[in-house]
Image (spheres, helix red, strand yellow):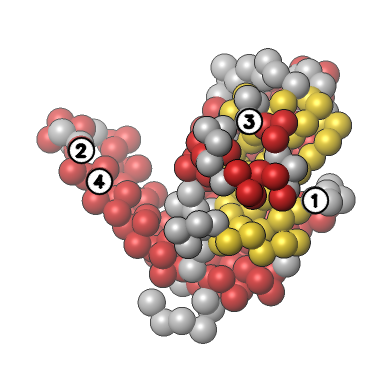
Amino acid sequence: MVNTILEKNIFTNKNSIPAIKNLLILAGVSATGKNQFIEKIQTDGHKKLVDDLQLNEYTNAQHIDSGTLNSKNLNICASELILHFDFMHHALVHKSGFKALSIIIQQSQKINLITLCSSAKILSQRHNQRIKDTLQKASPKQKDQLFFNYHMLYFRYKQAIFENPIQLNKYYLKWEQFIASHHLKNHYLLDSGLPELDYLGAYSNEKVKTILGQAEKI
């Protein structure tokens, strides 16, 4: 389902957003810890990683998440921007998010790209916990609403993907193709399944497959 509001709104052309000096794209499928990573680099966490990847200019950057990217109220007001991009969500629901990201990339002077990954087993556990937490927090009235039930169906659909490393890797492959089409460099891979993020150097799908554990039976 394409988000037509977005397509008719500020991302109809690149002149609708300001020039961005420094853009950090933090990408991954759902449940890879993107929000936690952003919070840590903006509160002096992961200091060694910030220094190694030269991310110091992003400690006070504006942060835009995947949901906001699809909003008609999106307002980019800083020259330093961190963009949280859930490419699994955009591939499944808001495909126009890729168009929005393309235009932001065109408007950016310097781009750093970090993709987060973790084993399919860990991602499955994290996402399943999200389902449990959502159900626990919802009131009986909310549970009767059509949107809530649609949301839970979407969660369970994603859960089936998380339990299959080969299916999960397809989303990483699509992301890799998108990045290649924009000729982006400075693309790094981090394993977010460890207590301290493991910096694995330049992104490659062979590394992704190893992290996901395609040979594992979940």
Give the amino acid at mark 3. Thr
In this view of the protein, can residue 14 be seen by the observer?
A: yes
Q: Position of residue 174 (x, y in %)?
A: 68, 59
Judge depth for marks 3 and 2 and give the one in front.
3
The three-letter amino acid code for the residue at tag 4 is Asp
**Upstream in sequence: badge 3 or badge 4:** 3
Q: Which residue is mark 2?
A: 137
Q: Where is mark 1, residue-wise?
A: 186
Which residue is disc 3 drawn over?
Answer: 59
Does 160 sit above or below residue 218? above
Where on the picture, by quarter, is residue 82?
top right
- Residue located beneath label 4 in the image: 133
Q: Callout 2: helix, strand or loop?
A: helix
Disc ID at residue 156: none
Q: Kindly check if marks 4 and 1 are in contact, taking CB atoms under 8 A apart as contact.
A: no
| Residue 195 percent location from the top left of the image | 45, 58
Please name whichever residue, 133 or 118, is drawn nearer the observer in this view of the structure: 118
